[in-house]
Each structure stands twice: as C-alpha cells, then as structure tokens.
Amino acid sequence: MMFDRDSRFSARVLRTALRFMPENHRNWSRAMASEFEAIPQSGARFSFALGCLKAALIQWGHTRQGLALIGRGLIGSALLALALFGLVWVNTIDAPGLARPVSVLCVIYAGAGMTAFWSVRQLQFYAVTGLCMAGLCWFWFLLAGQPSASLPPGLLAALSLEAGLLMTGILVAATYFSFVHPAGNGVHD
Amino acid sequence: MKRVRAPSRATLRLLAALLTQPDAARYGYELLETTGIKSGTLYPILMRLSERGFLDAEWRDSPEPGRPARHVYRLTDAGAAYASDALQNAKTRPASQQEKAHA
C-alpha cells in the first residue's frame, strides 16, 4: 500500500534524524518520536520527519564531534578540488623530463592528503595510496618521456584521462574502506 | 557583555501561541499546526527556550491507548514575562529589523 510505504520511509528518515541527535538531547529525540506516532497523515509525517532531521543536524553541528567533522569535510573538499584542478593544470603544461611526474606526484599527494586527513591512522589507506602513487608516477613518467612524442595526441589525452579516473577511483575506494572497516588495520586509538 | 539577540519571527509566533493560554500544556504537533512553523524550526526553538528556563517540558500519557507518552510544553512564569516583553518590543521595532532578527 502506498500509505504504508510512505510511512515506513518517513519512519526511516526520523530514525536517521534521531541517530544524529547529540547524547544530551536524547529526551528531545523521544519527544519527536512520540509526536511522530501521533501524526495521522502520511504527508505530514514525512514533512515532520524531514524537519526533525534538520533540527537534529543543527544540534549535531553544534557538538565538538560535528564541528570537527564539518571542518575536516571542508578542508578535505578544498584539497580534493585543489588536486583535481592540479591534475587538469598538469595535463595542460608542456613540461619536459621529470617536471611532469613530479608535478603529478604533488597533485596526488594533495589528493591523498584529503583522505589521510580523514583517517590519519588507517594503515591500509597508506598502502593503497602508496601503490597508487607509484603506479601513476611510473605511468606519467612514461608519458612525459620519449614514448609520448610518438603517441597520437588523442590517445595521450585518453590515457591521461584514464590515469585521472584511476586515481580518483582509488582515492574514493581508499576513503570508503577506511570508513567501512576502520578497525580492520590492527591499529587502535 | 553577552549580546542578547532579538527573537526571530518564528519564535515570536510560537511565543504568541503559547501566551494565548499560558497555563495550557501543548503538544508539539498542536504547536506546529497552530503556528504553521515547520518541525525543523520549532524543535530547536523549543530546546532553546527550555534551556533558558522559559519553557516547561514534561511527559504526559497519550490519550489514545497503546500510544507512547508525549511531551507537552508550557511557558514558565519567566517565559510568560519574556514572551510579553518580546512581543511588545516586536510591535515597536521597525519591520526591517524584525526581518534581520534571529532566534
């Protein structure tokens, strides 16, 4: 039934909201949950649950943990934007010899810094990032050296794009795994 | 010196609704319907008013059997005085300042 499905979805939104509510506001979580039960219409329930999510996020954003995570998110996003911008820029410069791989290394470091900032103690992240950096530097080194002169520009662009996508994929995977398996590295806080 | 911010329009609307019957205990949903404020705005205001000692929040058994107990809200004496002052000040304040005010 449409009504039941909508209500279940609204209840899920509310449960998410209550999870974000800081410990010292648990009483308010209970108040929201019991009020939700008393709302008869499905549409009003959804609107109520959505509002509770907003309220809980505001409260959570004022906690130390919330502020720290928002700060990390902002710095991480800035680093990611810098890394992506750098990747595009590096691809446009006509740099001979080692200049291009070194520039790429810096860009990858900036990208790696983003995820390292989120999970400083995640060893598996360093392993993945190290491999990623080594592989990509080698790849770029080949492209910046003699072989690149003999490659058609279209293929060069495609390979560069592939390298960029590969790096993004690996960084996303490293971030994901460091969040999903935070205790899987044998390092304890 | 701590700067006291003027209450927002949503807060004023809530205070006005609570002040119409200062002794009556109101449910959250009832306040949403009366004031037209969304729950995402209402609950942070209720929390703030409660923390400042302007609002009493207590649990009351639901009139419908099998339903969980619900929170009811009522202005304290200090809250009623604050609400009267805030509403009075809002009447004398220029509209442009009211728009800028936050809760």
Image (cartoon, grey):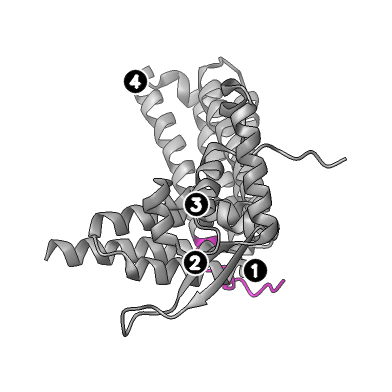
Amino acid type, label 4: Gly
Q: Residue at x 49, y 42 (%)?
A: A167
Q: Which mark is residue B25?
A: 2
Image coordinates of residue A170 in percent, x first then y, are: 48, 49
Count of numbered circles in the view: 4
How far apart, in angstroms, are the residues tagged by discs 2 and 3? 12 Å
Q: Which residues are magenta?
A: A177-189
Instruction: Name the main secondary structure of what is drawn in magenta.
Output: loop
Q: Residue at x 26, y 67 (%)?
A: A8
Q: Position of residue A130 (x, y in %)?
A: 61, 51
Q: CA distance from mark 2 to mark 1?
A: 24 Å
Residue A86 higher or lower than A127, as above or below: above
The reply to whether label 1 and label 3 mark residues of one chain is no
Q: Which mark lies nearer to you, 2 or 3? A: 3
Residue A159 figure quarter: top left
Specify which label sits upstream in the sequence, 2 or 3.
3
Residue type marked 1:
Asn
**Type of amino acid at the residue the image marks with label 3:** Thr
Residue receiving disc 3: B20
Is residue A177 among the parts visible in the rendering? Answer: yes
